[in-house]
Amino acid sequence: MGVTPKIAPSMLSSDFANLASESHRMLNLGADWLHMDIMDGHFVPNLTIGAPVIESLRKHTKAYLDCHLMVTNPLDYVEPLAKAGASGFTFHVETSKSWSFYFLLLWFFWIDDWKELIQKIKSHGMRPGVALKPGTPIEEVYPLVEADNPVEMVLVMTVEPGFGGQKFMPEMMDKVRILRMKFPSLDIEVDGGLGPSTIDVAASAGANCIVAGSSVFGAPEPAQVISLLRNSVEKAQQTLIQ
Ligand SMILES: O=C(CO)[C@@H](O)[C@H](O)COP(=O)(O)O
Ligand SMILES: [Fe+2]
């Protein structure tokens, strides 16, 4: 498998009043990416940060900022986030999906929507990803991965988006397994409830990008948790290759 492990502490669990030092702390403890949860209070019932905070953080670090957009209108965020210095831009496939369900005609607009969105993300120098909620079938993301101009990561939510500290949903691992079989070199990220007790099942299903908030920030030795997450992915990759 050509995909490398990426451990991404979710900064939602950090002390937002000390975001720069919390970010440095995580990177010094072995994190690869910083996972930034952007919520608009509409797509999910919680409101977090937006481009101004990413811009402030960017002044303090060169790290890969893995932005997870839990927002209803991701297109509106492309330009501000690119200017702010975001690295990855992962939008939810469910945005505008309800229209497609009711109106066949609008379904075509939805297709154009995500094509335009991916194109815009790339032309603004960011790396596009698509996320899906627990209730969304995995087939929904296939067209975006198989497109001529595809997304470069799929984020499989392992909790309902909106809050940190929820319980991991092992039944989501079927999605990860299917994706890994179909797309051996795709970055597959899992997000929600990941930690020492849940990493092995996610890693052996084929996930290589691991978001972890409460398990890292709540640990007495966060470095040990980061290293355990990485070791689990590396070990599972050896098994998957054989
Ligand atoms: O996107 C989300 C929540 O919607 C996540 O990124 C969480 O912030 C992960 O936190 P833990 O479940 O690891 O505590
Ligand atoms: Fe997230």
Image (cartoon, rainbow, N blue to C red):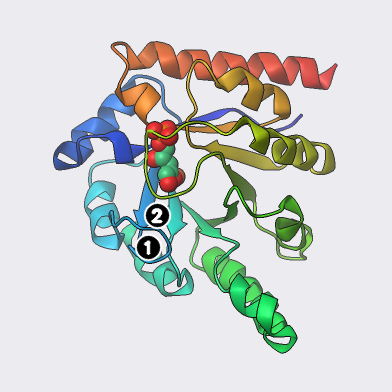
Does any portion of residue 77 appear in the rendered image? yes
Can you tell which quarter of the image residue 50 is in?
A: bottom left
Q: Position of residue 70 (x, y in %)?
A: 44, 58
Binning the other alpha carbons within 10 Å of mark 2 as few (below 14), some (14 to 19) or many (20 upward) gives many
Q: Residue at x 63, y 27 (%)?
A: 202
When asked about the image quadrant of residue 84, the answer is bottom left
Location of the C terminus by quadrant is top right
Residue in the image at 50% along x and 58% along y: 126
Residue at (62% x, 52% y) in the render: 135
Q: Earlier in the sequence, mark 2 or mark 1?
A: 1
C-alpha separation, residue under disc 2 versus residue under disc 1: 6 Å
Residue 32 position (above or below residue 154): above
Kindly give the residue lying farthest to the bottom in the view shown: 105
Amino acid on which disc 2 is placed: Ala
Residue reaching furthest to the left: 17
In the rendered view of the protein, which quadrant contains the N terminus?
Answer: top right
Residue 112 shows in the view: no
| Location of residue 49 with respect to 26 vertically, above or below | below
Name the residue at 35% across, 19% down: 29
Give the number of the disc on residue 81. Answer: 1
Residue 49, percent from left and from top: 28, 55
Residue 122: which disc? none
State the mark number for residue 86: 2
Count the marks: how many? Answer: 2
Above/below status of 100 relative to 40: below
The answer to whether mark 2 and mark 1 are in CB contact below 8 A is: yes
Q: Residues within 10 Å of mark 1 (few under 14, many from 20)?
A: many
Residue type of the residue flagged with mark 1 = Leu
